[in-house]
Amino acid sequence: MDGLEGVIVAETTTSAVDGEAGELLLRGWPVSELAGVIPFERVASLFLHGSVDAPPVDLGPGRAAAFERIDRLGGALDLADGMDALRASVAQLDSATAAPELAAAVAVFAAAWSRRSRGLAPVPPDPTSSHAADYLRMVHDRAPSADEAAAMDAYFATVVDHGMNASTFAARVVASTESDRVSAIVAAIGALKGRLHGGAPGPVLDMLDAVGEPEAAEAWIRAALARGERVMGMGHRVYRVRDPRAAVLERALEGLADRGDDARLALARAVERAAERVLAADKPGRAIRANVEFYTATLLEALGLPRGSFTPTFASARVIGWCAHYDEQRASGRLIRPRSRYVGPRPASAA
């Protein structure tokens, strides 16, 4: 089937996505009961060790070790595209790198590229800090507020895993060959770079910039559809209702609203409501609702992250899910080897 839609390729205990009910379970937990409630280090423990009651995964030493490697990465962090830089940097890690150290390295390399891309020196990590707070500190060279750290932590937990998406499938294919973990994560990063997988949060902000005011939302969306354009951040390959992660990130945004971000949040909400109305009329019978990227863009913008850093930041959380899938696939011991249907030319039949 084109795109493997509806095809079951693995059994997993990592996450469950119910597109009809709008439910996302992470190791059996509703995403709304993890994100913003349980620290990301415990979410990482849930994925890597199977329980939130296990000791939290300490990512601090891994961040410190990864930072020491930066000067040995050659020109990887000088590449213009953040995902190119991340792929080239992670590829230089030792193939035996364990999951916590690998996850920590992704965050350090993503933050360092964000600094380098703006002509700034990378900021050394603070191994005693939480992963979310230290990520923001490495990007901005200042300690984040408690609200900022909490919002970043909620974001990391929200996007840690999401079923058999393209990058996760890529990681599992590599894992199934009995290749190493670093190779699997490099493959996942390559898949995430693609515009159809990890590339939509930035354009959501372009749309909000173009709309400008809540009152202009409906007219702008109608004009965009008339031009044959997509409404960014709306619709999902799986969900037929509102993406449950959008609600979690919207809640995290509310925690930042007292800093003056309430106008941007109000605009985002107005655009979402207008898009729902217009799309319902324009495409009757299709449920097109906000996806995770709609409020990802608004939240990461509120946290001061440059738009080019959005997808590398996403990878800094999703790497934990990728590592869990790697372990699960290796445990199954089965090579992923689908078949294709040949539809090309054949030799002419003999006379």
Image: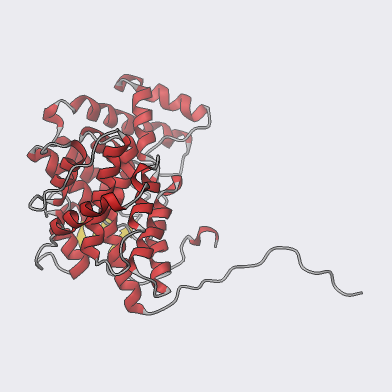
Color theme of the render:
secondary structure
Res 220 seen here: yes
**Quadrant in which the C terminus appears:** bottom right
Quadrant containing the N terminus is bottom right
The spot of residue 197 in percent (x, y) is 41, 49
The residue nearer to you, when weighing 153 against 62, is 62
In this view, the residue in front, 39 or 125, is 125
Q: Residue at horizontal 77%, vertical 68%?
A: 346
Residue extending furthest toward the right: 351
- Residue 28, visible in the rendered structure: no
Q: Nearer the viewer, residue 87 or 243?
A: 87
Q: Residue at x 25, y 44 (%)?
A: 111
The x and y percentages for residue 294 are 32, 39
Furthest residue to the bottom? Answer: 333
Please tell me in which quadrant of the rendered image residue 304 appears. top left
Left or right: where does residue 154 sit relative to residue 9?
left
Q: Is residue 219 above or below residue 6?
A: above
The number of numbered discs placed on residues in the rendered structure image is 0
Give residue 271's position: percent from left, percent from top. Answer: 33, 29
Expressed as whole percent of the image width and height from the top left, the position of residue 237 reads 42, 51
Vertical placement of residue 29 versus 148, above or below: below
- Residue at the spot 11% in from the left edge and 29% down from the top edge: 258
The residue shown at (29%, 71%) is: 327
Q: Is residue 182 above or below residue 115?
A: below
Q: Left or right: where does residue 79 sit relative to residue 131?
A: right
